[in-house]
Image: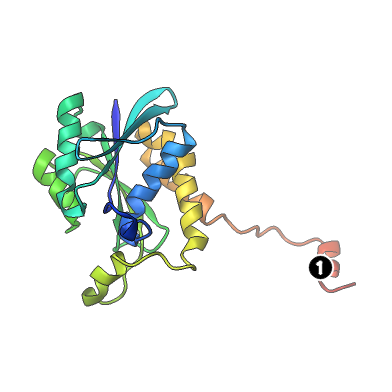
Amino acid sequence: MLLLVGLGNPGSEYAKNRHNIGFMAIDVIAERFGFQPFRKKFHGLLSEGLIDGAKVLALKPETFMNDSGRAVAAACAFYKIAPEDIIVLHDEIDLDAAKVRVKRGGGHAGHNGLRSIHGHIGPDYGRVRLGIGHPGDKDRVTGHVLNDFSKADGEWLDKLLAAIADHAALLMDAKDADFMSRVAADVNPPRNNKPKTKNETDNENGL
């Protein structure tokens, strides 16, 4: 059994914040694979379903970001899930918007949600870092993450969330490189550099 955890803050006032992209990703995955309705459990909202035949739990902690580890630890203890079978999806200001990186183990890089999870279960879990971009000034970071995504962000955000759901099975199989490359291709499809035919050139020139 695998545990997918999306990080965010509970409440409608935070729902569209950049900090809540982890919640957004979990919701899209759960919808895509027909998971059961979320129910309150383990200090959060829990759902379950199948991805490529594998049983998966989806958890959205409702403890607020800084105490996310309490919900994760409670679910792990009940289901006896090892840290290696946990994948956390979270916002990452040190990645450009729409970029995705998968990491297994390691430090929390100052992310308060990860810091809390580290404190409860240690560092040996996986995480999917979802780039939201940096505001350019450390004094503006809090406002950046706690503000809603802009209208312009919607151009890449919807593509990114859909791609994560489309290729979630690769993530479950620990095919991290394949997952990252497929998501990147969906969000930023390669340009068609094939030379234009004479007819296509003539059409463009109105000939």
Residue 38 falls in image quadrant: top left
Residue 98 to residue 86: above or below: below
Percent position (x, y) of residue 43?
19, 40
Three-letter residue code for mark 1: Thr
Is residue 124 visible in the rendered image? The answer is no
| Observer-nearest of 56 and 82 | 56
Is residue 156 visible in the rendered image? The answer is yes
Decide if residue 76 is on the left or right side of residue 91: left
Residue at 48% x, 37% y is 32
Residue 56 falls in image quadrant: top left
Q: What number of labels is visible? A: 1
Residue at 35% x, 66% y is 133
Q: How is the image coloured?
A: rainbow
Decide if residue 8 is on the left or right side of residue 188: left
Which residue is situated farthest in the top direction here? Answer: 53
Residue 87 falls in image quadrant: top left
- Tell me the quadrant of the picture where the N terminus can be found: top left
Residue 53 to residue 11: above or below: above
Residue at 14% x, 29% y is 77
- Tell me the quadrant of the picture where the C terminus can be found: bottom right
Residue at 34% x, 48% y is 23
| Observer-nearest of 63 and 182 | 63
Q: Element at badge 1?
A: helix
Percent position (x, y) of residue 204?
81, 70
Percent position (x, y) of residue 165?
45, 41
Q: Which residue is mark 1?
A: 201
Percent position (x, y) of residue 152?
49, 68
